[in-house]
Image (cartoon, grey):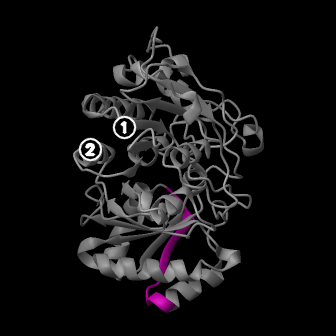
Amino acid sequence: MQRYQRIFTIVLDSLGAGEMPDAGKYGDEGSDTLGHIDSSVEHLNIPNLARLGLANLHPLSHVEAVERPWGYYGKLMEASVGKDTMTGHWELMGLRTTKPFKTFTDTGFPKELLDELSRRTGHKIVGNKAASGTEIIEEYGEHEIATGDMIVYTSADSVLQICGNEETFGLEELYRCCEIARELTLKDEWRVGRVIARPYVGKRKGEFKRTSNRHDYALKPYGKTVLNALQENGLDVISIGKIKDIFDGEGITESYKSKSSVHGMEQTIEVMDEKFHGLCFVNLVDFDALWGHRRNPVGYGEELERFDEKLGLMLPRMKDSDLLLITADHGNDPTFRGTDHTREMVPLLAYSPSMIGCGLLPTQDTFGAVGATVADNFKVKMPEGTVGESLLPEFQ
């Protein structure tokens, strides 16, 4: 018998909960996204996350632990090699990545790749370096508008990003160029995890602003995930935010794009009114994109407070047959050096109104515990080669 009819899994993109044991291999010793956000703000007001046991899991200076949390809480360690979005999300649904995706942070993209991209798209290329998306638009936006050249850049992640002004370059042209870039970067020597279209509007420096028409062109998962298993067994898999892009549509039955993390939570609350049977899988990207990469701990804390406010609207609407799992996909400590993700454990908060127990869960050796729990609940077999042990027996 299935214990829960609906499971809501919400990924607070980049909310790490302390360094992994192997953080030194990544140069991330001392990273602690959640802890350093808390210590950087005057008062972190997250009463609903506190009720679910967040401060019991990770001691915080501005948030008190509660005597009896509403549910269960624990930490997940990453078994995969890497610390990027796709690696983390794929592992949440059971796929362990053993070969990291290509990054071009220090060198930029090879001349051979850019020459072919330019030839195929018909645009000259400017940029070709690791940069903040907002900064590179300020640097090259006026040039692109004047010449039609294409802004190409990367980051510390395994990504090739292309900027295009919606009013002059054109959104459809931007998407066409990204599709060509995705095709080219399927080659092993250029194999990046994602090609990302980064549209913006504005006519001059100081006025440029990125829009919500971003589109991610991800690699397909190398094997089946728990999402595939759910779909193949007739269950609903509803994605909110960039989940569909991260899995390249694999295993998704219905999807919603979000304009922001707040909008993503509003969409999640709306989905609660739907009569579905299965998983609602949510990514809230602003924590990472707006605050982690830009090294803004105060902004990150304020985003957590906005999430907590929406969480306060969500919790009373949950049914006894609903399960909520809140977690993350990697860290991005906004007080750390550089602008890269950080190799951290991630939190897991589990709650249902039907729970009578609460407490600390054993630390798991893979993010895949999330997918395994989902699969176990819906009585579907984990795909071959996936990792993770179900935490369902821990929930009372």
Question: For residue 272, which numbered disc appears in the image?
Answer: 2
Which residue range is magenta in the image?
120-131
The quadrant in which residue 385 appears is bottom right
Residues at circles 2 and 1 in contact by the CB criterion of under 8 Å: yes
Identify which residue, 66 or 210, lies in the foreground: 66
User: Mark on residue 52?
Assistant: none
Name the foreground residue: 66 vs 323.
323
**Where is 276 relative to 298, above or below?**
below
Q: Secondary structure at mark 1?
A: strand
Number of residues whose C-alpha sits closer than 10 Å to that of mark 1, classed few (under 14), some (14–19) or many (20 or more): some
Label 2 CA crowd tier, 10 Å (few <14, some 14–19, many 20+): some
* Real-space Cα separation, disc 2 to disc 1, in angstroms: 9 Å
Identify which amino acid the numbered label 1 is placed on.
Answer: Asp
- Number of marks in picture: 2
Q: Decide if residue 240 is on the left or right side of residue 76.
A: left
Image location of residue 142, percent across then percent down: 33, 69
Res. 236 image quadrant: bottom left
Report whether 51 appears left or right of 154: left
Q: Residue at x 58, y 32 (%)?
A: 393
Disc sitting over residue 322 in the figure? 1
Q: Does the segment drawn in magenta span residue 325?
A: no
Compare residues 223 and 148 and report the one nearer the observer. 223
Q: Is residue 166 above or below residue 278?
A: below
